[in-house]
Image (cartoon, rainbow, N blue to C red):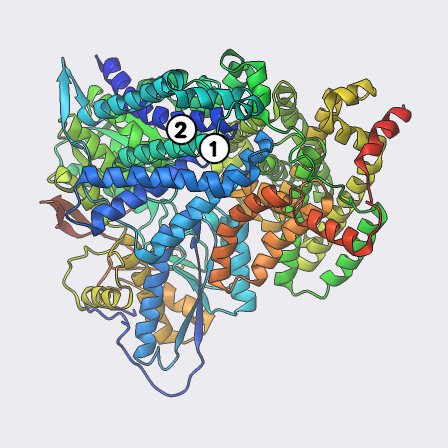
Amino acid sequence: MIWLQYAVFGLGVGAIFALLAVGIVLVYRATGMLNFAHASIATAAAYVNFTLLERVQWMPVGLALAITVVFGALLGIAIRKFVFGPIAGTSQVVKLIVSFGLAGVLQGAVGLIWSRIGTPTLPGHSLFSMTSGIKIGAATIPSQRIALLVIGAAVALGLTLLLKRTEFGMCVRALAQNPLAARLAGVDERRVHSAVWAIAGATAALAGVLIIPFGVLTPLSLSGFQIKSLAAALVGGFASLPAALAGGLGLGVVQEMLVGAPAPLNGLRSVLATGLVIVLLFARIERRFVSEQEARALEGDERTLAGKWKPVPLGSPRAWLAGTVILALVFFGLSGFWAFVAGRTLIYALLGLSLVVLTGWSGQVSLMPGTFAGIGAALAWILGTKLGFPMPLVLPLAALATIPIAGIVGVAALRLRPLYLAVATVAFAGLFEETLFVQHWFANSGNAMSVPRPKWIAGDHVFGLVVVLIVGATFAATAAFGRTRTGRALRMARDNERAAASAGVNPTKYRLIGFALSAAYAGLAGALLAYLLGTFSMATFGFLVLSLTVFGLATVGGIRTPIGALVGAFIVVYLSEVFRASASVQDWVFTGTGAAIIAVMAYSPDGIAGMLARFKRHSRAVEPPVVETFELAEASGGR
Amino acid sequence: MIGAPGTGGARTPGTVVGSGSHETIALGTVLPLQGGQRNWGEPVLRTTQAFIDETNANGGINGHPLKLIAYNACLTCQDEALQAVRRLVEQDHVFAIVNTYVEVVAFQSVIDYLNKAGVPLIQGAAESQTSAALSPVNFVTAPSGLFWARELPQMVKRFTTATKIGLTYVDVPTETNGLKYLRPEFARAGITIVDEENVAAEEDAVTNMDSIVTRMRARGAQAVVSTNPVLLVYGRLAASRQNWSAKWVGLAAWSKLVTDACGHTCDNSLITETAGLSFINRNTPQMNQFKAVLARRFPGGEISGLTLGAWVGMQLTSYVLAETGPDRSAFLRAMERIRNLDLGTTAPLTFGPDRHMGATADMIIGLQNGDYVPIAGPVNYGEASS
């Protein structure tokens, strides 16, 4: 009987996962956008709901719920118009990156708005009794769990019928399978997309209102639900609503069963969602639900904003080396504090560079730079502090030892389409944080780890100089690498796998090279950061803390050129320190980073570096520095 | 001895000592002030500022006006926190860092730096289950983890009849590190832990507590001990849904979360301690002043463990500053001389060269008719042997 109880508890929780999942599926099915901001919409709606109940005392709970659901729908429509609209024709990966930016904007906006008007306290109002239960035999089943189950299932099934049995549903499916044909047949794409976003926003709002009374209201309240609802949606290949419902309910049941399971089995709870995502992705579950034609239509423009990409300069190795010498001289003019900030800026630039190589050049979106940096930092602790290796040996070893770990992800990644690879790296990041990063032997059980600098470089200036030289040399070497046959082949494989293969370039090999280089850079950056801080714990390297920041800075700076990594790091670390004293600027920076990602993806996919390059081209009217179309001939001719 | 029990000898914002033109004493703080984490940082910042404004309005400390410089760093952003603190110390030349709620995780990289720089760090009731983050310059008004390890078994023994308990905690180092001290103390008190349940993160309490409660009950637990307030509140709600009236004992500094989320459901069943902070309805001049100033200078600010903790941190800082002035060495020495200091808003504080977590006692409070009532205290249970 106790297991029956666990199952019913799980069904109630699973209904919330399912409710969020159907919104994710609906948007994906219609627009190809995998929305990582879905839970943030739910949270924003919960704030609205609680504020209504707190400020308008006479308002019945039901009316407040209705207003909140309408708010969710309007928010969905606004997102369609202002966020999704400008990127509608782009690839799924671009849309995914934008959804991360959107999540940052929503969380930042909620924090900002409600810090001004006051966070509503839990009003004690709930649609269901928080305390009553229904007796089934010896077991007591809380009534709210049953209510959640009924509502979640009803919404999911209702939306399934909407998609299958109505003209609107037919339009959604037609747009998903062949947008051009649908448009020619008279389907109003904007109206359909607006309706889809409205429904998704409304279901998210409903989920937020239903679950928050059982939790604590903060702008991050439902962030943990995002990956779980994503896993539920993935059960249906992000395309099937009934399967998403089943996935949500199943996930909820298994999660609660694991709570009741004996140790160490119950420890699997923390990796359940991330593990499920990885398994489903590698099982290529989407093939069961999405036809090849539909999958291609959903993928959008594989070349990412075709027509807007222009050649960007990589910077010549000599220029990078000259810049390194100048920076080294400038370093000695800085105070100790600003030398520290500059050193940290360069380490972040190195992390950004790891994404330039992997995402910008090799076309593989990884959201794990922070994870690989964490591995490098932990290796610095193991090698440098525990085993007593000198720093000059620790740094290359940390970089090299990160490669085989990254190789596991890289080899697995070869099977995945770009969007699924991005999702897989999010799941892998979570998996590493829940497993490797809490091990005593690897990460001191998550506690503080000390990695003191050697005495000869203990000072900020000397250590900063070491950072300048290492990072500068890495940038110069990368710029040189970008001009070699291998570097060009890397980009060719990104642009057109078939053309690359026909020119004798093995895309698999070059994808793995991209992963290996990227991991080594991130591992090196992590080890340098460990020495910079002296004491740290793995919390520094969390996905939400570091990986998203680095992805944001590389995107805003310009992810296809090393210059972009440097520009992005300069803005996010150094310039934001310059403006630290201004709280309003800081607010803007936090919320603005998400907004900047959206704007960059919509209007200047090569970020600030791309804008600078365009400005330079216009002002000097000179030829582009690197023309990608040369590469096919160059690479094949070089063989 | 600087203060004596019950004397209310703490410096309060209304106190003016000395007069004339004196240099401003700059204090710094680093808090999560942006985005989703703003909820945690802002109450601390606004309360600290309210104390400083009130102090300055009354002539400062021995004529020295106070100034607060606040910077942002997220709860786990260690490199950002270190950078912010270095700016405070090296660019803004603050005298001390106060009331940084981010101590436990984000400040792991900061403590070493402050220690080398000799800059004091004063925390009002900061969250820390262990003393691992403490250093010669770091003072916290909360009791030590060893105190909690002794206190929780004694609370079970004194306020329940249970001999078999379930233990639940969030699986993070700040909580799990204390378990090795807690388990032997329960054994010493003759109490058996029949079930241990970890929860991966606080938000999982929303979904996991029904199953956890079911399992504890099935294993014969007669009471539940929680090392985390969120687990305690949502666990108690789950227990209520299942008509299980076991007592819940744990660390749950009072806040509106408990009364609003649990309310009458927690009546007669919640026994809590307050991280060394006094019960909010304690009738002392200092507590009344805290409430009055907060209402005036931070309208809409919640009276919670966060705001009272921030107030206590500033009381302690200004109390010692009044004695030493802006002299860091003298300040640190004076902090370590404090014995049984009653600030009127917290349990008596005792520091020493080897003791930088000040509270030695705790208020025990419960819920009655949906509101807090004092049960006992301040009670000193001593500390577990490390």
Labelled pair 1, 2 in contact (Cβ < 8 Å): yes
User: Is disc 1 placed on a helix, strand or loop?
Assistant: loop
Residue at point 57%, 19% (across, down): A295
Q: Residue furthest bottom?
A: B20
Q: Which residue is mark 2?
A: A23
Quarter of the image for residue A15 reads top left
Task: Decide which of tag 1 and tag 2 comes sooner along the chain.
Answer: 2
Disc 2: which chain?
A
Quarter of the image for residue B11 reads bottom left
Q: Which residue is mark 1?
A: A35
Q: Amino acid at mark 2?
A: Gly
Q: Amino acid at mark 1?
A: Asn
Q: Position of residue A632 (x, y in %)?
A: 83, 27
Alpha carbon separation for disc pair 1 and 2: 9 Å
Between B7 and A274, the residue placed more toward the observer is A274
Q: Is residue B42 left or right of residue A536?
A: left
Residue B149 vs B123, above or below: the answer is above
- Quadrant showing the N terminus of chain A: top left
